[in-house]
Image (spheres, rainbow, N blue to C red):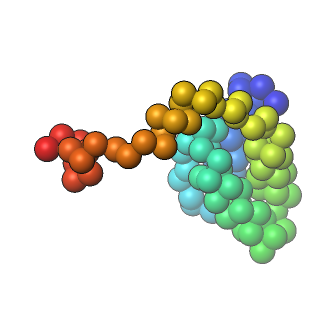
Amino acid sequence: MTAAEMIATAAHLHVAMRRKMGRVTDVEWMVTDVAYATAMTQLALQHATDQNDEDLRKWSSKLAQAWADKAPAPPKSAAVVQRLAEPHPARYVVGLRC
């Protein structure tokens, strides 16, 4: 699924959830964050099951499938892995800048 199709699917799910559940969602977040998308699709599927709503079931299943089909991120280079493994400087532990 292309990025445009994924945005369209998330937008359809957003509209359906708003109309049928009174739930306001963030379309952009559903497209960029798998955890949020999963939570919203599960919520919509639960409501669809409870209310026997095929529209919600269709769009939530389609978005969930889009995330399932999405290719995993490419492996990070050794330099990036090494840098991420290093401890963070103490000045960033409490806040952004101390």
Image x and y of residue 50, in percent: 78, 74
Image x and y of residue 18, in percent: 60, 53
For the N terminus, the image quarter is top right
Image x and y of residue 40, in percent: 64, 56
Rendering quarter of residue 7? top right
Asked whether, in this view, residue 82 is left or right of residue 5, the answer is left
15 vs 21: above or below:
above
Residue at the far left: name it: 98
81 vs 23: above or below:
above
Which residue corresponds to the image point at 55% horizontal and 50% vertical from the top-left?
25
Which residue corresponds to the image point at 83% horizontal and 40% vertical from the top-left?
69
Asked whether, in this view, residue 10 is left or right of residue 91, the answer is right
78 vs 37: above or below:
above
For the C terminus, the image quarter is top left
Camera-side residue of 85 and 66: 85
Camera-side residue of 25 and 97: 97
Camera-side residue of 28 and 19: 28
Which residue corresponds to the image point at 79% horizontal and 35% vertical from the top-left?
71
Which residue corresponds to the image point at 67% horizontal and 64% vertical from the top-left?
43
Q: Is residue 73 visible?
A: yes
Q: Is residue 28 visible?
A: no
Asked whether, in this view, residue 97 is left or right of residue 87, the answer is left
